[in-house]
Image (cartoon, rainbow, N blue to C red):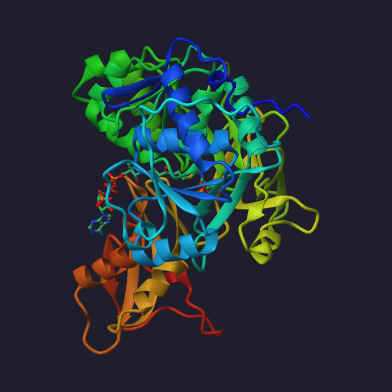
């Protein structure tokens, strides 16, 4: 069977920059050489971990794994020891890809290491696995327990970025700029696989700074709302950068809701209306505001080609148009690694994936998200954070008798993590508890604030009622 390549531009390299990180760039020929050489070193492996710093090395490493047909597990380089131990135990990679000279944390350092040589020269393999083969395993938080690895097939990656290309009229001529982390769908699938599959260019300036972005000359920009919020702040005193950024075709926001205030501020500064798109790690992107549509702030656009989205009325709330967002389509994951129980629980009895989000349709056919079913999921800076994971970490501290973690509205982060703690005996210091969580989990999961209390509000069954905690 002839398999259509996932990254055709690497087989017939155009004369163009493929990847630029800061001041270092690789053309398509150079990328084909470096990733081809690395792919040869990976051939035949079952799974490979990638120490996913926001660098050219990570993009080359993941590209090589995709060329070699070896599923890649991109790892947040700042994972705490508990989380890293879990992810490595669960995904069992045979080797780790890392930039030369970079020191790896304990359990990762124990794996056989392959350094990413961005100057390598090798041939791109001509054979690749079928679209049904796994391409990436991306870890995502749930409400309780440790993160789960979502297995994304090569076909899901290809069809999703192709559907987005159609929605955004995305071509090889586009220069995409973003400063996203490379261990999540947003930065890695949309932000790296996306431009490489088109044969276009990615520029990663490190941060979504107004001047750096203005200098990039991007035609498309991707970011999370926290980045756009900070950009809007900068542009208030930098109209020249606003005008330069406004020469882009599209500013796209996702991973969390962009506020109407930031929509308006960015429109004023750049002349562009930000387009939102919506998705999950498990589903890839589901809906998007099209390039040709006038975006409606507060909505996340229409379903992508071949993606079905339905709203199932919530129990006891029929008739108001609100419903649980459930989906089917070619971008959906194959399941959570080693977790058939969790995979089954995430689907309805008739096989649709339950996103956990609540939405309604607008008269124009766009989806508006109005909330989430679980109060135990927090979105901070665009990162999904399970409250249970932080509560468990807090409870491991001798000074904590009870803990409840919530997301509190925050202008910059969307939500910020706040922990309510009933101390065991004399209260430990707030800093001590924050540092305790930071040692076990990724830094973005640590509470920004700890509030000590005598008791937590509980219902008759003894369950904590988070809605009664002061926000
Ligand atoms: C945090 N810090 C703290 C505390 N809390 N330090 C002390 N005490 C605390 N309580 C640390 C942080 O860990 C960080 O440290 C530093 O303070 C600054 O924090 P902050 O300003 O919040 O973060 P930032 O480093 O400036 O990053 C903001 C960010 C980031 C760039 C918006 O949150 C980000 O990259 N978000 C993107 C998330 C994303 O890609 N989501 C996609 C998944 P240190 O510097 O040491 O770390 S969703 C997805 O893929 C789906 C499909 C979708 O729809 O896209
Ligand atoms: P993750 O599991 O980290 O991929 O996060 C997926 C969640 O991010 C979704 O279930 C939504 O709650 C949220 N999300 C993604 N994009 C948007 C958006 N444009 N607006 C609001 N929420 C979003």
Q: What is the x, y in percent for residue 46?
A: 58, 51
Question: Residue at position x 29%, y 84% from top?
Answer: 398
Residue 200 drawn above or below residue 285: above
Tell me where residue 131 sits by quadrant: top right
Question: Residue at position x 27%, y 46% from top?
Answer: 102
| Residue 367 in sight from this viewpoint | yes
Closer to us: 7 or 179: 7
Question: Residue at position x 57%, y 20% from top?
Answer: 11
Tell me where residue 366 sits by quadrant: top right
Tell me where residue 66 sits by quadrant: top right
Q: What is the x, y in percent for residue 219?
A: 42, 16
**Is 403 on the left-hand or right-hand side of 318?**
left
Closer to us: 320 or 365: 365
Closer to us: 115 or 51: 115
Quadrant where the N terminus sits is top right
Residue sitting at the far bottom: 425
Q: What is the x, y in percent for residue 309?
A: 70, 40
**Is 356 on the left-hand or right-hand side of 55?**
right
Q: What is the x, y in percent for residue 88?
A: 47, 60
Residue 110 drawn above or below residue 29: below
């Amino acid at each position: 069977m002839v398999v259509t390549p996932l990254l055709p531009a690497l087989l017939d390299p155009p004369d163009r920059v493929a990847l630029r990180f800061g001041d270092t760039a690789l053309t398509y020929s150079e990328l084909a050489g470096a990733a081809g050489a690395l792919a040869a070193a990976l051939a035949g492996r079952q799974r490979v971990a990638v120490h996913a710093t926001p660098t050219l090395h990570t993009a080359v490493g993941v590209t090589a794994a995709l060329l070699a047909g070896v599923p890649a597990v991109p790892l947040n380089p700042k994972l705490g020891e508990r989380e890293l131990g879990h992810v490595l135990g669960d995904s069992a990679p045979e080797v780790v890809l890392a930039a030369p000279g970079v020191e790896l944390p304990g359990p990762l350092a124990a794996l056989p290491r392959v350094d990413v040589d961005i100057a390598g020269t090798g041939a791109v393999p001509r054979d690749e696995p079928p679209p049904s083969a796994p391409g990436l395993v991306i870890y995502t938080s749930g409400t309780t327990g440790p993160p789960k690895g979502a297995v994304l097939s090569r076909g899901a990656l290809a069809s999703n970025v192709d559907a987005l290309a159609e929605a955004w009229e995305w071509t090889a001529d586009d220069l995409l700029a973003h400063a996203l982390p490379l261990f999540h769908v947003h930065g890695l699938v949309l932000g790296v696989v996306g431009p490489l599959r088109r044969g276009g260019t990615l520029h990663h300036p490190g941060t979504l700074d107004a001047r750096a972005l203005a200098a990039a000359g991007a035609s498309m920009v991707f970011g999370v709302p926290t980045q756009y919020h900070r950009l809007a702040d900068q542009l208030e005193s930098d109209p020249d950068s606003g005008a330069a950024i406004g020469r882009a075709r599209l500013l796209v926001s996702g991973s969390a809701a962009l506020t109407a205030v930031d929509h308006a501020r960015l429109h004023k500064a750049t002349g562009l209306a930000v387009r939102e798109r919506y998705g999950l790690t498990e589903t890839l992107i589901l809906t998007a505001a099209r390039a040709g549509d006038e975006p409606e702030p507060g909505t996340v656009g229409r379903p992508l080609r071949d993606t079905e989205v339905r709203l199932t009325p919530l129990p006891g709330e029929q008739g108001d148009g609100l419903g649980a967002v459930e989906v089917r389509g070619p971008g959906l994951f194959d399941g959570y690694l080693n977790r058939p129980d969790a995979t089954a629980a995430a689907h309805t009895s008739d096989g649709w994936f339950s996103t956990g989000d609540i939405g309604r349709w607008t008269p124009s056919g766009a989806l508006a998200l109005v909330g989430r079913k679980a109060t135990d999921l927090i979105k901070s800076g665009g990162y999904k954070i399970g409250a249970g994971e932080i509560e468990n970490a807090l409870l491991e501290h001798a000074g904590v008798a009870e803990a409840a973690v919530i997301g509190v509205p925050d202008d910059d982060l969307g939500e910020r993590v706040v922990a309510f703690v009933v101390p065991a005996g004399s209260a430990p210091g707030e800093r001590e508890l924050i540092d305790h969580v930071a040692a076990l989990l990724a830094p973005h999961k640590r509470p920004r604030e700890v509030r000590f209390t005598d008791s937590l509000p509980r219902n008759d069954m003894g369950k904590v009622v988070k809605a009664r905690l002061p926000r």
